[in-house]
Image (tube, rainbow, N blue to C red):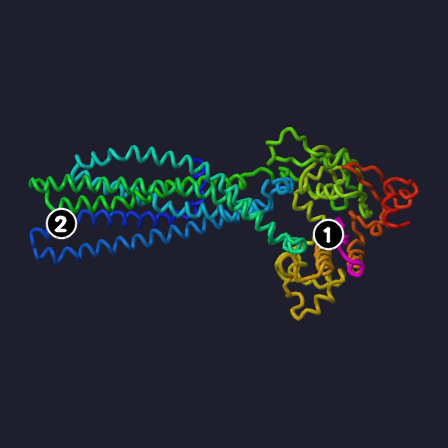
């Protein structure tokens, strides 16, 4: 717990000036509240002695104290709330930045998927936000507690000692609740991740859901997970709220003791109504800091859980490591070489399933790609084709072996420099919720956007963009939902053309298109491939017939290699694919 809060306090370092003002305002508020308790004795004694002059003057003084108290509270809380907003916004930014830095290995194996990550950045951070707002109470309530307790001791130390005997069992009770809250807090947040995943899948998969009449099934799935979540929250609320009636019952018992004790003292002439009013007033005021400290204690348990979950992502070392002394990429490199490359996903999130050995995606792959040639990779789904090109871009690193450019391991290059050398066009086109022009410009933000139109013309996309009244400022919608499949693909090609990287990766770029769209897209691809080292992954073998070299993959291994004519003549796996697609 201490470790997490130390980290949280480090996040507050940039706001020292605001926190200083907040603390000062909190001290003013606490002192003013304490003075109100002190002045109650004077007020009651004045009324008892019927002193007209003091009766007229004292309310003005009390009003002035109250004014200081409410102004102090306003400054104190408003600064703390805004500071909490600033800190959690930064935490969300840190999480998003970390999400983008973490390797595909992490994202592919994160147990609750992207829904779980969204839950961390939204719900967990909100819990931290509420916890941060309690920091204000940590600066004021203990001071108020000490001042008011001091007043109680000053008025009657014997009675105060009797009252304090009630505190040890209450503290032990709260400590037990705290343990339980941390336990169920973890469980609750894990279930919330699953619930977020269910909601995310229902939104993103709405087309499939409606097509297969799965609406009731998805509602049932939501209800099942939601009921588990509600059961966990029920246990948290039952334990959290148990602290409140316990303290209220204790407070009532104490008031009755005070009433009896001081009533007897007044009847004996050992105390005045001012003593009774002041003591009781201080005790009633003491309930506020006790209640807030108790509430803070409960909330802190949930905050600790959220902090652990958020910082576990921020501190994760599952990003692709950067070499310390990086080297420049040779500008006129000649070859890219895969040497004894093997790869398996590191299922770090599934450590409990140790009996299941990791599945090898690639096995001892050896491959040389010459500059300027077109390499085609074919094979059945799951044979390791996409993994091969993902390794080339260092989305993750080989489990064994190495990938080099002109004999230099690509790990020794800056990741940014390496990826700047590669243009990517995939089957599943991802467009940002922005304008058409901006999505093309994202190919290389260091370039002047004046080249966007030329890139779109080369990609055969300029005509359909120009037909829109907004032109290049037209929005593409969420993930390009306002464009057709062919239009999205041509924007993706224009983005790669704008980047103009020397290496081009086409990952089944036309497999999801109809014949008419494929023709239009292929025109853009032909222009894009000119003068570039191109790696083509394709199910439609008609797109790879003119490749300089074709490799056939099966179960993570290269089983055939050669030109189209050579492989057809060989009569192996490639020849079988050709026959299945009625090609020659």
The x, y position of residue 396, in whole percent, is 67, 40
Q: Position of residue 353 (x, y in %)?
A: 62, 31
The kind of secondary structure element at disc 2 is: helix
Front-most of residues 427 and 434: 427
Q: Is 67 displayed left or right of 356 in the figure?
A: left
- Residue 96 seen by the camera: no
Residue 59 appears in the figure: yes
Residue 394 found in image quarter: top right
In the image, is residue 249 above or below residue 433? above
| Left or right position of 506 against 144 | right
Q: Residues within 10 Å of mark 2 (few under 14, many from 20)?
A: some
User: Is mark 2 in CB contact (under 8 Å) with mark 1?
Assistant: no
Outermost residue toward the right?
Answer: 569
- Does 218 sit above or below residue 263? below
**Outermost residue toward the top?**
355
**Residue 45 located left or right of residue 337:** left
Q: Write down the residue under mark 1.
A: 427
Q: Quadrant of the N terminus?
A: top left
The residue at 18%/55% (across/down) is: 61
Residue 507 sits inside the magenta stretch: yes
Say if the magenta span includes residue 537.
no
Magenta segment boundaries in residue numbering = 502-518
Residue 383 picture location, percent across and down: 76, 40
Mark before the other along the chain sequence, 2 or 1: 2
**Who's the residue at 28% across and 43% down the image?**
248
The residue carrying mark 2 is: 42
Crowdedness of circle 1 by 10 Å Cα count: few (<14), some, many (20+)?
some
> SS at mark 1?
loop
């Amino acid at each position: 717990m201490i470790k997490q809060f130390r980290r949280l306090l480090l996040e507050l370092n940039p706001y020292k000036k605001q926190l200083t003002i907040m603390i000062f305002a909190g001290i003013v508020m606490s002192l003013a509240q304490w003075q109100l308790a002190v002045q109650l004795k004077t007020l009651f004694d004045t009324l008892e002695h019927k002193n007209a002059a003091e009766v007229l003057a004292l309310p003005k003084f009390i009003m002035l104290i109250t004014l200081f108290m409410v102004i102090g509270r306003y400054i104190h809380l408003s600064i703390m709330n805004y500071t909490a907003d600033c800190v959690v916004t930064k935490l969300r930014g840190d999480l998003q930045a970390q999400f983008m830095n973490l390797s595909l290995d992490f994202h592919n194996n994160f147990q609750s998927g992207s829904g779980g990550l969204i839950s961390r950045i939204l719900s967990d951070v909100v819990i931290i936000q509420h916890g941060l707002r309690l920091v204000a109470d940590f600066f004021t309530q203990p001071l108020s507690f000490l001042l008011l307790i001091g007043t109680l001791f000053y008025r009657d130390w014997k009675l105060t000692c009797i009252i304090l005997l009630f505190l040890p069992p209450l503290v032990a009770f709260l400590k037990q609740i705290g343990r339980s809250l941390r336990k169920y807090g973890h469980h609750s947040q894990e279930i919330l991740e699953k619930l977020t995943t269910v909601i995310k899948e229902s939104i993103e998969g709405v087309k499939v859901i409606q097509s297969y009449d799965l609406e009731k099934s998805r509602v049932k799935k939501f209800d099942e997970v939601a009921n588990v979540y509600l059961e966990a929250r029920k246990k948290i609320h039952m334990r959290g709220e148990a602290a409140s009636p316990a303290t209220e019952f204790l407070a009532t018992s104490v008031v009755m003791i005070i009433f009896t004790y001081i009533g007897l003292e007044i009847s004996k002439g050992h105390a005045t109504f001012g003593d009774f009013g002041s003591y009781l007033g201080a005790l009633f005021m003491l309930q506020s800091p006790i209640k807030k400290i108790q509430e803070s204690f409960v909330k802190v348990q949930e905050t600790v859980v959220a902090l652990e979950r958020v910082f576990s992502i921020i501190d994760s070392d599952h990003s692709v490591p950067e070499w310390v002394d990086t080297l420049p990429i040779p500008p006129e490199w000649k070859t890219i070489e895969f040497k004894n490359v093997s790869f398996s996903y590191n299922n770090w999130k599934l450590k409990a399933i140790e009996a299941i050995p990791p599945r090898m995606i690639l096995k001892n792959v050896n491959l040389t790609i010459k500059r300027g040639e077109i390499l085609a990779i074919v094979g059945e789904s799951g044979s390791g084709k996409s993994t091969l090109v993902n390794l080339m871009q260092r989305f993750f690193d080989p489990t064994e072996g190495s990938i080099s450019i002109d004999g230099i391991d690509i790990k020794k290059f800056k990741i940014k420099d390496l990826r700047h050398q590669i243009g990517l066009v995939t089957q599943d086109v991802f467009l940002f919720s922005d304008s058409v022009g901006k999505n093309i410009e994202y190919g290389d933000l260091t370039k002047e956007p004046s080249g966007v139109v030329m890139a779109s013309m080369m990609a055969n996309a300029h005509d359909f963009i120009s037909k829109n009244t907004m032109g290049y400022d037209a929005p593409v919608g969420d993930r390009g939902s306002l464009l057709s499949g062919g239009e999205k693909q041509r924007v993706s090609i224009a983005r790669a053309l704008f980047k103009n990287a020397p290496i081009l990766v086409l990952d089944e770029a036309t497999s999801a298109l109809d014949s008419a769209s494929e023709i239009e897209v292929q025109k853009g691809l032909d222009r894009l491939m000119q003068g570039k080292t191109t790696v083509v992954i394709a199910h439609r073998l008609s797109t790879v017939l003119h490749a300089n070299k074709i490799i056939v993959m099966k179960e993570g291994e290269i089983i055939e290699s050669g030109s189209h004519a050579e492989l057809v003549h060989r009569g192996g796996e490639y020849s079988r694919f050709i026959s299945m697609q009625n090609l020659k």
